[in-house]
Amino acid sequence: MKHDSQTRPPRQPSTPSSTRLALLGALLAAGCAGPARSVPTPIPTDPAMSTARPAVPTYTFVSVSTAKPGKLDALAALASRPGERMDAAIEGVIARQVGVDRERNTVIVWVTLDRKETLYDYLATDQGKSDHGEDEDMTAIIETFEMYDLTPYSTRL
C-alpha cells in the first residue's frame, strides 16, 4: 500500500491522556506553560558586553566551612557577619543566606550579586577588608573552608 498524503487517511486529533492533562496542570500552576510571557534577559557571559548593572544576577559566591568541635554556632555567627555588613554597605547584593547543617558540622554561605566585580571591588576597600574580618584569627573556629565563584546557570530569586 502506498503511504502518501493522497492515500493516507486524515490524522485524527488525539485526546490528551489524564497523565498529559495532569502534567499540563502542574506546569500551568508552576507558571511554566500557558500564555506567552516575557522572555528573561540572557545572562551576559562576556564582562566587556556592558558596564551597566545587569537586570539579572551574574555572580554567586558560595563557601562551605566545617567547624572545629563545639564551634558550629560560633562559625555560623562568624560566617553571617560579612554578608550582613556588605548588604548594608553596598548596592548589588541580590540575595544572601547562611545555612547550617548540624549533622555534617557545616556552614554554607551564599551571596548572589549583580556582578562579580561588586564583591571584589568592595573587598578591596578598607571597609570591605574590615567588614570581611580580614584581621580576625578564625583558626580556632574553622576546620575546613572551600570557596566557589559561580556564574548562575538557572535562577529564580
Image (spheres, grey):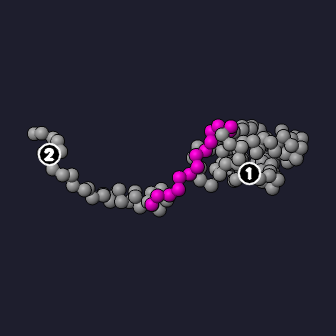
Q: In the image shown, does 26 or 137 lie closer to the viewer?
A: 26
Residue 23 is one of the magenta-drawn residues:
no
Other residues around mark 1 within 10 Å, as few (<14) / some (14–19) / many (≥20): some
Q: Which residues are magenta?
A: 35-48
Question: At numbered mark 1, what does the secondary structure look like: helix, strand or loop?
Answer: loop
Other residues around mark 2 within 10 Å, as few (<14) / some (14–19) / many (≥20): few
The type of residue carrying mark 1 is Gly
Residue 129 visible, this orientation: no
Residue 37 is one of the magenta-drawn residues:
yes
Q: Quadrant of the C terminus?
A: bottom right
Give the image location of residue 5, x and y in percent. 18, 45
User: Which residue is depicted at the point 56% across and 51% down?
Assistant: 40
**What label sits on residue 92 in the rendered view?**
1
Image mark count? 2
Residue with the mark numbered 2: 6
Residue 27 appears in which quarter of the rendering? Answer: bottom left
Can you say whether 137 is above or below 155 in the image? Answer: above
User: Which residue is depicted at the point 89% across and 44% down?
Assistant: 126
User: Which residue is depicted at the point 73% across and 52% down?
Assistant: 93
